[in-house]
Amino acid sequence: MRNHKKILIDQLDGKLKPFFEIKNIEVPERGWVYTIRTALNMTLQQLGHKLKITIQGVQDIEKRELSGSISIKSMKEVGKALDMQFVYGFVSNHKSIDEYIEFKARELAEKMVLKNSNLSVENKVKDKLEIQQEIEIYMREIKTEIPKSLWD
């Protein structure tokens, strides 16, 4: 089963990698639709004609883009009308999905090991190296299984 999960994670990482490279692109202050339309010297009426909507409808699209309430479907339609392709995706806050899973697995392993090694006098004898080794073992097991509890 691990190989199947690993393959899926690797495939997902491959699909998300291009987005990671562009994650720092800033959205223009007035939004993409307005910025592209005006850069092309296209009027509201002209874009409205291409979209088969009114001038007010185009203004509404531009406002909804800025507020974040526009649908993906609408953005795809605008992209098509501008002879462009609208793309969207997610950018991980980690270098990869695999790295994210490892981060969460380590976090859970640390919680488990530290919880189970009550700081009693006997356990204080355990040195930091032993604790780190236990954490590594649990982390690898968790990363292999990817239990649903990892996301709690």
Image: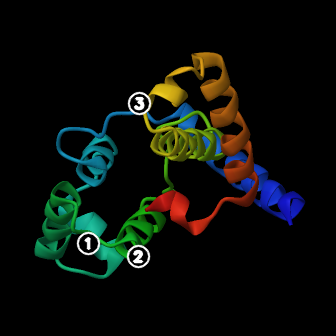
Mark 2 and mark 3 residues within 8 Å of each other at the beta carbon: no
Report crowding for label 1: few under 14, some 14 to 19, many 20 or more residues within 10 A (C-alpha). Answer: some
Q: Position of residue 34 (x, y in %)?
A: 23, 51
Label 3 belongs to which residue? 24
Kindly identify the residue that appears in the image at 18 percent across and 38 percent down.
Answer: 29
To which quarter of the image does residue 46 belong? bottom left
In front: label 2 or label 3: 3
Other residues around mark 2 within 10 Å, as few (<14) / some (14–19) / many (≥20)? few
Image: 115 above or below 144: above
Q: What type is the residue that disc 3 sits on? A: Asn
| Residue 73's disc number | 2
Pick whichever, 28 or 15, lies toward us. 15
- Residue 120 location in percent, x, y? 43, 32
Which residue is under mark 1?
48
Q: Earlier in the sequence, mark 2 or mark 1?
A: 1
In the shown orientation, is residue 51 left or right of residue 88? left
Screen quadrant of the C terminus: bottom left
N-terminal of the pair, mark 2 or mark 3, is: 3
Q: Is residue 54 visible?
A: yes
Amino acid type for the residue under numbered disc 1 = Gly
Circles 1 and 3: CB distance less than 8 Å? no
